[in-house]
């Protein structure tokens, strides 16, 4: 049925109703003169008016309810703007038709449909406590199918010049009235506003956040007070500036009083004590060889703990005389949390010492004698002596014979008598010469005999050199030899020295260690004796515990290098060969060939050839010598490219050095 037909149908019942009423009027004309007929007509009219009025009121309430609901109306017929609502047909002429009729909702906030859009604001409190963070309710209405939310602004009402602030909540830290304004702007240009007045009051007493009544504190206190009204701070009865910290030790009474609003106040008493308890009678880290009486003092003393060798030790503060040997610790604490701790030692036993001489006293010597005193416990310093770092050893050199007794004390002051006897120094005694192999140059060894006195050697090939008050005798050897050198000083004291020269080359076994990060290679060699002159670039491995190990770090490959190592008895040579260092990227080229059938390209063969061993790659075949990669690509069966295809791969050598190789091919 089209619109015209529908309109026609809707119009037909109206005309028919009019005709029926006219006929009824004609039929009822017979009763006009009858009083009973008039009563029936009047009653019918009254009933019709009541039913119609009830239906009209219900329709207005329905419109109001729909306008307050954000959701769209559920009646599909009302959503269809192109269709008009059908009127009852001839058979539906009863009053129930008017009651069930639901009109199409109209937009909010119109003269025809006035609604209370501010309904959600009825529960907003008008009086709140200071410091409360309020979340303001939102107001949303439906403006012809569009949801519109009210803009919320507020200002402190007592300041008429203050600008409005757009917010959804506000922090009520300022006492007074706030003016809240809700504004809704509709599409048709109309604007609706709603003002709320919220009064912020302060009825709660001030809060002191960082001071508790009756507590003790051991650091400066900067007061943290929560109060929204003006307030006054008194400290021990005197007005105090709360922006300044309380720094002096003492007992305090703090009063915070509101200045204007309600006059409430809060009082707390506390103690500021930044001083640790005092410990008298002993010193920290001190030693004592007699009894001590410890006295701990503090106005707010809480606890004292004394331990001896880690075990709690009972004592009476300021009374007990502590005499037992041991290591003590005393820990004192006060109510504010201040802690003081001392450690001390009581030692009533003298140390045990041992005296040694270098050189020893078994034979005469012309050298100075080093005397060493070793103790079983730490010693005090002794004038003229050197106290070693371990505090267990005293040393001193003597150049003349001496016999003396003196006291050595431990840290507690316990003394022990030490006697030293030096009677074996003879400056006239002949000095035993020393032999050294000083150098090796071009397969020649220089032997040197060093003496404090001039010597006469039975071999004229020894050359005498006087240097720094010493007599040196040198001889050059060019071949292996073992000989006994006889000498005699000017006083007639004679002696012999064995000289052993080994010119035979001894090959050293070389080990290598590579650094995986830098590729540097460290070469190691080991000798039975210490090398007289370490070759350039080499160093002694001091962490090696067996024999003598020397090492050198190589940063480049070495084709062939001979390194000589000379000890007192042997001549060594090490052969260095290093070829594992590779920091250069591989050099490679790519070639492209085609496999054809009947002059049509069927496959392409990519060959990448490198100048060194490279790693394999997925999809590629690696040659036996590991220097060539080959890949065969079949011609696509569909979507065959017509342009040149450019591709590349990244090849790596065994050290991870990379090279990018590019190649092109086509299927034309």
Image (spheres, helix red, strand yellow):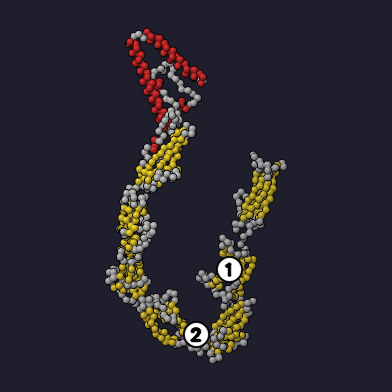
Q: Secondary structure at mark 2?
A: loop
- Rounded to the nearest angstrom, the CA distance separating label 1 from label 2 is 40 Å
Classify 10 Å Cα crowding around label 2: few (below 14), some (14-19), many (20 and above): some
Is 67 on the left or on the right of 319, as rendered?
A: right
Is 587 on the left or on the right of 203, as rendered?
A: right
Q: Secondary structure at mark 1?
A: strand
Where is residue 94 drawn, in percent x and y?
39, 18
Residue sitting at 34 percent across and 63 percent down? 249
Which tag, 1 or 2, sits closer to the chain's start? Answer: 2
Q: Is residue 604 visible?
A: no
Quadrant in which the C terminus is drawn: top right
The disc at residue 311 is none
Residue 466 vs residue 272, the one in the foreground: 272
The disc at residue 367 is 2
Classify 10 Å Cα crowding around label 1: few (below 14), some (14-19), many (20 and above): some
The image shows residue 517, relative to residue 479, as above or below, that is above
Q: How many marks?
A: 2
The disc at residue 552 is 1
Residue 337 vs residue 392, the one in the foreground: 337
The image shows residue 12, relative to residue 445, as above or below, that is above
Residue sitting at 31 percent across and 55 percent down? 267
Residue sitting at 39 percent across and 48 percent down? 173
Residue sitting at 44 percent across and 45 percent down? 161
Where is residue 593 drawn, in percent x and y?
69, 48
Where is residue 283 drawn, in percent x and y?
35, 72
The image shows residue 447, relative to residue 655, as above or below, that is below
Image quarter of residue 192: top left
């Amino acid at each position: 049925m089209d619109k015209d037909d529908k309109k026609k149908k809707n119009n037909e019942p109206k005309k028919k109703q009019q005709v029926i009423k006219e006929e009824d009027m004609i039929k009822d004309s017979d009763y006009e003169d009858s009083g009973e007929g008039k009563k029936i007509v009047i009653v019918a009219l009254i009933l019709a008016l009541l039913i119609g009025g009830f239906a009209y009121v219900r329709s207005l309430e329905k419109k109001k309810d729909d306008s307050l609901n954000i959701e769209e109306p559920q009646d599909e017929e009302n959503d269809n703007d192109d269709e008009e609502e059908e009127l009852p047909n001839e058979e539906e002429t009863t009053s129930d038709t008017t009651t069930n009729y639901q009109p199409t909702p109209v937009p909010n906030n119109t003269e025809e449909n006035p609604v209370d859009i501010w309904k959600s604001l009825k529960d907003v409190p008008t009086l709140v406590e200071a410091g409360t963070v309020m979340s303001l309710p939102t107001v949303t209405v439906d403006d012809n199918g569009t949801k519109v939310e009210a803009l919320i602004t507020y200002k402190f009402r007592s300041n008429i010049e203050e600008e409005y602030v757009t917010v959804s909540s506000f922090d009520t830290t300022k006492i007074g009235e706030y003016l809240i304004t809700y504004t809704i702007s509709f599409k048709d240009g109309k604007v609706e506003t709603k003002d709320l007045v919220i009064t912020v009051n302060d009825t709660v007493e001030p809060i002191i956040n960082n001071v508790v009544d009756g507590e003790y504190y051991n650091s400066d206190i900067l007061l943290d007070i929560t109060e929204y009204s003006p307030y006054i701070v008194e400290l021990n009865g005197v007005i105090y500036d709360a922006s300044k910290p309380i720094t002096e030790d003492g007992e305090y009474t703090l009063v915070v009083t509101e200045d204007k609003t309600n006059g409430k106040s809060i009082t707390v008493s506390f103690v500021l004590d930044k001083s640790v308890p005092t410990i008298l009678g002993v010193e920290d880290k001190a030693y004592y060889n007699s009894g001590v009486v410890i006295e701990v003092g503090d106005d707010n003393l809480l606890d004292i703990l004394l331990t001896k060798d880690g075990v709690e030790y009972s004592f009476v503060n300021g009374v007990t005389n502590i005499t037992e040997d041991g290591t003590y610790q005393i820990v004192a604490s006060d109510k504010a949390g201040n802690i003081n701790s001392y450690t001390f030692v009581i030692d009533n036993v003298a140390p045990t010492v041992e005296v040694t001489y270098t050189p020893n006293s078994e034979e005469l010597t012309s050298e100075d004698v080093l005397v060493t005193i070793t103790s079983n416990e730490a010693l005090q310093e002794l004038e003229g002596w050197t106290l070693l770092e371990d505090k267990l050893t005293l040393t001193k050199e003597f150049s003349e014979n001496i016999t003396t007794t003196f006291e050595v004390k431990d840290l507690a002051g316990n003394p022990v008598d030490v006697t030293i006897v030096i009677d074996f120094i003879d400056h006239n005694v002949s000095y035993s010469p020393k032999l050294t192999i000083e150098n090796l140059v071009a397969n020649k060894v220089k032997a040197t005999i060093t003496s404090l006195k001039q010597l006469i050697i039975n071999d004229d090939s020894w050359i005498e050199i006087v240097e720094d008050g010493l007599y040196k005798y040198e001889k050059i050897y060019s071949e292996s030899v073992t000989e006994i050198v006889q000498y005699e000083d000017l006083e007639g004291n004679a002696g012999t020295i064995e000289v052993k020269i080994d010119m035979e080359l001894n090959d050293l076994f070389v080990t290598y260690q590579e650094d995986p990060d830098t590729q540097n290679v460290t070469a190691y060699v080991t000798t039975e004796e210490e090398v007289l002159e370490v070759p350039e670039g080499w160093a002694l491995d001091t962490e090696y515990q067996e024999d003598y190990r020397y090492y050198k770090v190589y940063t480049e490959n070495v084709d062939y290098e001979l390194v000589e190592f000379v000890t007192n008895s042997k001549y060594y040579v090490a052969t260095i060969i290093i070829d594992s260092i590779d920091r250069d990227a591989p050099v490679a080229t790519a070639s492209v060939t085609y496999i054809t059938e009947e002059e049509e390209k069927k496959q392409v063969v990519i060959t990448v050839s490198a100048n060194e061993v490279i790693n394999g790659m997925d999809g590629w075949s690696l040659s036996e010598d590991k220097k060539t990669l080959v890949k065969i690509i079949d011609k696509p069966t569909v979507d065959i490219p017509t342009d040149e295809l450019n591709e590349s791969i990244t090849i790596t050598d065994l050290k991870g050095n990379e090279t990018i190789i590019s190649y092109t091919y086509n299927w034309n």
